[in-house]
Amino acid sequence: FLPGLTKDHVLELDDILWVRTTVEGVIKMFQFSGISMLALDLSDEWATLDQSSRDLVEAVLDKESPLVGHRLGSAKKHRPDFDCPIIAYRAFNEEQGDDTASVDSPLQSVDIGATPETRLQRGDHIILNASSTFYKNFKDSGDFVVLRKLHSGGEEEDPNDKTRAIVAGCILLGLILLVSTSTLPLLEAVMVSLAAMIFFNITNMDSIVKAIKLRTVFTIVGAFGLGKAIGQEGVATVLAELLIYLLSPFGSRGLLVAVFVSTVALGIIFHGTAVVVLMFPICMEVAQSMGIPIHQLVGVLCISVSCQMLSPISYQTNLMAYSTGGYQFADFTKVGAGLVLCIAMVSIPMCEWQFPH
């Protein structure tokens, strides 16, 4: 609330309050009788709408959204077809401040988090006071990374929705069954599942195409191509053998550390399957030449290959978050380095204790 507002303050009719709260808090206020949710551009036309006929929709802005770079107060000018106001806002980057170019703003001295002068950036969360058709029309739009309905305006649910949900769940279980039993490779199984979803009218081809973000696909393909090229040239094997040679004077534990570090380092570029293919022969050779139990080496290899969290190109999901969330390359290293270190400190002694021979 505004600074200086106490529990004894008496609220008057038509008072305007700026509130910091959670998503659940926004929903409760939206449903609360006697409160009208104003747009962040302070236009009062939306306050006269029947709240019971409106939806609350949460959105995360994609970097391609036409709203990115524009002020909250003028957002509707750049996407008039949305026909809904922004009533809540949370910055993706919490250090992102207001645009202070408007020095005559009466709100700039108040720490309220967002004003009509705040500029929207990719990754920002917004909540829209939307019409009942908005979610259906824009759920596959490339303007948003995520679009989620928080509160329904009370329109009757389509009885077919539950049936479609059940059928979609069965198709998902079928996909898992086909892949886990090696009946079909993953790609073919996914294609069969998509065909089934179209056949049962759960989705359509246009929605599927809209859901595919080509820049993410191209980034993933490029990362795999780079990893394959490095593997074919033997660079990865040379680096792994060099690290093992340097740490071999430290005994069996030093070699286990070397296997862990080598595997994690290779996982920055390679897919996990490729890393195992590269490292397993080295583990076999080390076990035979140094007399280390092979199960210790394989245990460390299996654990370390799952530590693909040091870079955005380590794994497909990392790339998806990296390309849409506006992260920096170093963000993955900052978060992942400590976690990888903790895993190493626990897993290596555990493998030695669990597989002594």
Image (tube, grey):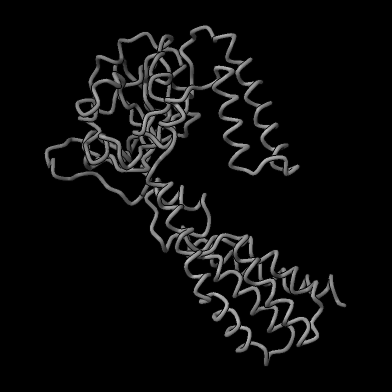
Task: Residue 216: give x, y in percent of width and height.
Answer: 42, 47
Residue drawn at point x = 69 percent, y = 41 percent: 179
Q: Quadrant of the N terminus?
A: top left
Asked if one can make out residue 15 in the rendered structure from this viewpoint, the answer is: no
287 vs 62: above or below: below
Residue situated in front as seen by the camera: 319 or 346 = 319
Residue drawn at point x = 48 percent, y = 24 percent: 150
99 vs 167: above or below: below
User: Total of numbered circles in the picture?
Assistant: 0
Q: Of all residues shown, which one is farthest toward the bottom?
A: 249
Residue 184 found in image quarter? top right
Residue drawn at point x = 29 percent, y = 15 percent: 46
Task: Residue 298: give x, y in percent of width and height.
Answer: 74, 70
Residue situated in front as seen by the camera: 148 or 107 = 148
Task: Residue 144: give x, y in percent of width and height.
Answer: 38, 34
Residue drawn at point x = 86 percent, y = 77 percent: 356
Q: Quadrant of the C terminus?
A: bottom right
Tell me: 351 left or right of 80: right
Tell me: 166 left or right of 235: right
Q: Of all residues shown, which one is farthest toward the right?
A: 357
Task: Residue 117: give x, y in percent of width and height.
Answer: 21, 37
Asked if one can make out residue 165 in the rendered structure from this viewpoint, the answer is: yes
